[in-house]
Image (tube, rainbow, N blue to C red):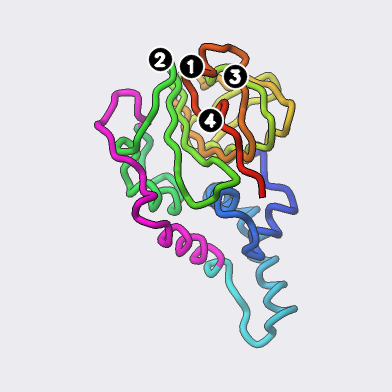
């Protein structure tokens, strides 16, 4: 059962259509798994419709359609680089993933440009036209981990398949986890299943091990400022 949810700000801004695309994608992914939050978004959307346009109630589907249209508008040159299939690519059932992610990945996770870090961790970046944030999928092999790192800004993670744990808790499919500047953790996947997550961050993360700092570009990349 989903335990971690977007807070009121994320829910209300998503309903208003005012979230950056990277964050809207994460909220939309969570809503795929959480009927309670989906209902809250629908209620806020209907309330906004009543306040600002009493003659034509607006449904939640219009907000979702707006997100899908934004995905469609990504220039072709920003599409993912297709690489040869690699054995470490996730093998999640595409049909079980959120529709927006299926659209972004062309229904083929294994064809994405996956970068492997060590034996158990791989990631694939999305260029979705949000220069202030980096958005990616990451996969942790069963029993493996993401190298220990420090957050220098905010990161949103949504679990799409499997589960992982850190020093604070255990996170399952649908959980919407927010990490803030200064937090340190080492996500570890459950022993029985690979863990696939969607993640977006607004500042670099810093690996505690120098070896991994050299291997992972987004660990040392400087985020643009507004």
In depth, the one of 100 and 22 nearer the eye is 22
- Residue 207: give its label: 3
In this rendering, the answer to whether 163 lies above or below 108 is: above
Q: Position of residue 213 (x, y in %)?
A: 54, 18
Labels 2 and 1: the sequence-earlier one = 2
Split into 4 quadrants, where in the image is the N terminus? top right
Q: Which residues are magenta?
A: 63-90
Residue at the far bottom in the pictured view = 55
Residue bearing mark 4: 218
Residue bearing mark 2: 119
Labels 3 and 1: the sequence-earlier one = 1
In this rendering, the label closer to the viewer, 3 or 1: 3
Residue bearing mark 1: 144
In this rendering, the label closer to the viewer, 4 or 1: 4
Label 2: state its secondary structure: loop
- Cα separation between marks 4 and 3: 10 Å
- Cα separation between marks 3 and 1: 16 Å
- Cα separation between marks 3 and 2: 17 Å
């Amino acid at each position: 059962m989903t335990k971690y949810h977007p807070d009121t700000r994320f829910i209300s801004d998503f309903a208003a259509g005012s979230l950056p695309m990277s964050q809207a994608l994460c909220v939309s992914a969570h809503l795929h798994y959480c009927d309670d939050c989906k209902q809250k978004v629908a209620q806020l959307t209907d309330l906004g419709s009543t306040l600002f346009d009493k003659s034509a109630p607006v449904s939640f589907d219009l907000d979702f359609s707006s997100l899908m249209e934004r995905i469609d508008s990504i220039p072709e040159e920003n599409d993912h680089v297709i690489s040869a299939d690699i054995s470490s690519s996730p093998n999640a059932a595409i049909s079980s993933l959120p529709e927006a992610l299926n659209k972004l990945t062309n229904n083929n996770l294994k064809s994405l440009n996956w970068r492997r870090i060590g034996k158990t961790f791989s990631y694939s970046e999305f260029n979705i036209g949000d220069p202030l944030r980096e958005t990616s999928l990451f996969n942790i092999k069963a029993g493996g981990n993401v190298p220990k790192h420090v957050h220098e800004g905010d990161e949103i993670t949504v679990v799409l398949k499997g589960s992982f744990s850190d020093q604070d808790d255990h996170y399952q499919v649908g959980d919407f986890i927010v990490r803030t500047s200064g937090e340190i953790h080492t996500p570890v996947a459950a022993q029985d299943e690979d863990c696939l997550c969607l993640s977006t961050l607004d500042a670099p993360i810093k690996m505690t091990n120098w070896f991994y700092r050299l291997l992972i570009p987004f660990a040392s990349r400087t985020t643009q400022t507004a």
